[in-house]
Amino acid sequence: MHLLTTSNAKTLRGQGAGYLTMILHLAPARLSGYQVCPMATKGCAASCLNTSGRGRFARTQAARVRRTRLFFEDRATFMAQLVDDIRAGVRKARREGLEPVVRLNGTSDIRFETIPLELEGARYPNIMSAFPELTFYDYTKLPNRRDLPPNYRLTFSRSSQGPDQVREILRQGRNVAAVFRIGKRQELPQFWDGLPVIDGDRDDLRFLDPAGVVVGLRAKGQAIKDRSGFVLEPTGAP
């Protein structure tokens, strides 16, 4: 069972910038019987991309459930396969003249930085430290993820936080992703409540973003109908 894919529709856009993203998709929330999104809200659940692209196929969903159960029920086997997949992805990237990068929480929010790894007789505090030459990145809703490995970049995903809370997150040195209710061909606002907004739909390479910005994403699927405060109007009002 392979854990990582390099054929995700959004991460493929990064290849034009010279990056090959290896991404892990688990079964989000409690779909597998195990909770992998502890801070999920109704709004983010509605906008989850779990069923977009190949995710709409039953076999893809079943594979994500199997991966998630393997993670919780046989962690050693899961981590060993993850190492093998990363190494295979690195070889693929080198063959294609691309820079390999890794996103472990494609449809989950797990603190991978806290999961130790035994590898060829050595013990590492996490998988990032086992591959210090690689860049890892993710989105997260968990506010207390600190003391991260230097090669792991996180972007905080806004749920219903107001501008003052977003400013505090930016002050801590983290960027914030926010979803706006605009069409896929419309331009995102340049500012949200005085905070600079960049277009996060152009690619998935969040580790390249400048510091201190709101990463704007367009509402997709059921998220367009959201009224929970998760999706923002371009003016900033929920």
Image (cartoon, rainbow, N blue to C red):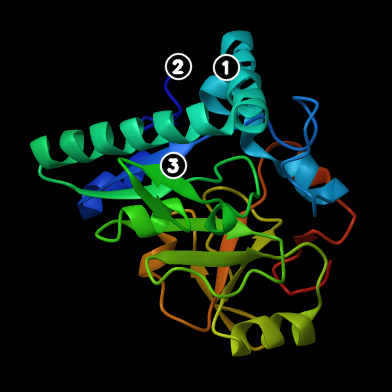
Q: Please determine whether, in this image, residue 226 is positioned above or below residue 92.
A: below
The dot on residue 63 is 1
Viewer-side residue, 149 vs 29: 149
Q: Residue at x 78, y 39 (%)?
A: 35
- Tell me where residue 114 appears, x and y as whole percent: 58, 57
Q: Residue at x 41, y 32 (%)?
A: 80
The picture quadrant where one finds residue 71 is: top right
Where does label 2 land, which residue?
A: 1
Q: Residue at x 9, y 35 (%)?
A: 95
Q: Residues within 10 Å of mark 3 (few under 14, many from 20)?
A: some
Q: Earlier in the sequence, mark 1 or mark 3?
A: 3
Q: Please determine whether, in this image, residue 128 is positioned above or below residue 222.
A: below
In this image, 54 relative to 143: left or right? Answer: left
**Secondary structure of residue under mark 3:** loop
Q: Kindly identify the amino acid type of the residue bearing the numbered disc 2.
A: Met
- Tell me where residue 64 appears, x and y as whole percent: 60, 23
Q: Kindly identify the amino acid type of the residue bearing the numbered disc 3.
A: Lys
Residue 204 can be seen, yes or no: no
The picture quadrant where one finds residue 91 is: top left
How much space separates mark 1 and mark 3, taking CA atoms?
Answer: 20 Å
The picture quadrant where one finds residue 59 is: top right
Q: Residue at x 77, y 38 (%)?
A: 29
Where does label 3 land, which residue?
A: 10
How much space separates mark 3 and mark 2, taking CA atoms?
Answer: 23 Å
How much space separates mark 2 and mark 1, taking CA atoms?
Answer: 9 Å
Q: Nearer the viewer, mark 2 or mark 1?
A: 2
Q: Residues within 10 Å of mark 1 (few under 14, many from 20)?
A: some
Q: Earlier in the sequence, mark 2 or mark 1?
A: 2
- Mark 2 vs 1: CB contact within 8 A: yes
Q: Kindly identify the amino acid type of the residue bearing the numbered disc 1.
A: Ala
In this image, 193 relative to 190: left or right? Answer: right
